[in-house]
Image: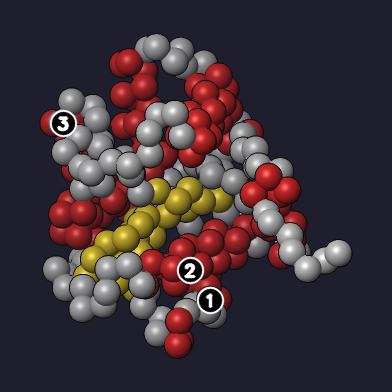
Amino acid sequence: MDIIEAVKTRRSIRGFKKDPVPKEVLREILEISCRAPSGSNSQPWEFAVVVGEALQTIKAGNVEMYRSVGGDPYAGRTSSGNSPESVYSKRSTEVMALVSDLIGMKRDDVEARKKWREKGVQYFGAPAAIFICVDRALPEVIPLIDIGIMIQTICLVALNYGLGTCIQGQGVMYPKIVAEHAGIPRSKRIIMSIAIGYPDWDFPANAIVTPREPLDSITTWKGFE
């Protein structure tokens, strides 16, 4: 797939087929993605790739924890600091409204929204999940830029194999559960998860193409006169 086409067509997949993704394909995706750049070639990323029974156990554990906090996966965790009136919060709200409309979920239906979030902590039914980790000996903030580049690279490379992805902080809200069943040692910090699998294009939410801000509203041009 052409790289420009990949960037333009990548989207978050929230409904997957049950078909397993071959280990050889996942290995090849990660091997290619490891060509991603990093500061001073530090390559701070490490992976845990989980499928099958181990992933089902993680999903079940996430759901149990999710329900124990009253259906709020963010309970007891620090917020991002964005006020509800900020443009960033508004963009997020707009995307959730698009999802709600496509799947027929009323925005004031609290129970339906809880069930939807429950799908999220189960990686939206993906047959595989990639967990990206860093060593705790590294600084907390500096490696995150490199990790972000790696995550984007994985998602773009996956398109070449007919696979879809969803980048999920929600998937690592309960890191102890993930670490226990993904074989991640305490010396590693879990940063993010990527749900990966073959997209179910009949699932309505997969039709979403999220809007982007006009370039001139977020860019300053100097020295071109």
Amino acid at circle 3: Val
When the figure is inspected, residue 151 is found, relative to residue 207, above or below; the finding is below
State the residue at coordinates (40%, 85%): 42
**Distance CA(mark 2)–CA(mark 3):** 32 Å
Which comes before the other along the chain, label 2 or label 1?
Answer: 1
**Most distant residue in the right direction:** 225
Identify the disc placed on residue 172: none
Instruction: Check disc 2 and report the residue beneath it.
Output: 150
Across and down, in percent, residue 56 comes to 28, 46
Q: Are marks 1 and 3 in contact (CB under 8 Å)?
A: no
Which comes before the other along the chain, label 2 or label 3?
Answer: 3
Number of other residues with Cα within 10 Å of mark 2, as a class: few under 14, some 14 to 19, many 20 or more: many
Across and down, in percent, residue 17 comes to 51, 42
Instruction: Check disc 1 and report the residue beneath it.
Output: 36
Amino acid at circle 2: Met
Image quarter for residue 117?
top left
Amino acid at circle 1: Ala
**Distance CA(mark 2)–CA(mark 1):** 6 Å
In what element is the residue under mark 1? loop
Number of other residues with Cα within 10 Å of mark 3, as a class: few under 14, some 14 to 19, many 20 or more: few
Residue 147 can be seen, yes or no = yes
Image quarter for residue 73?
top left
Q: Are marks 2 and 1 in contact (CB under 8 Å)?
A: yes
Q: Are marks 2 and 3 in contact (CB under 8 Å)?
A: no
Q: Is residue 215 left or right of residue 136?
A: right
Identify the disc placed on residue 69: 3
Number of numbered discs visible in the structure rendering = 3
Residue 122 can be seen, yes or no = no
In what element is the residue under mark 3? loop
Q: Which image quarter is the N terminus in?
A: bottom right
**Distance CA(mark 1)–CA(mark 3):** 37 Å
Query: Which one is nearer the viewer's eye here, 62 or 222?
Result: 222
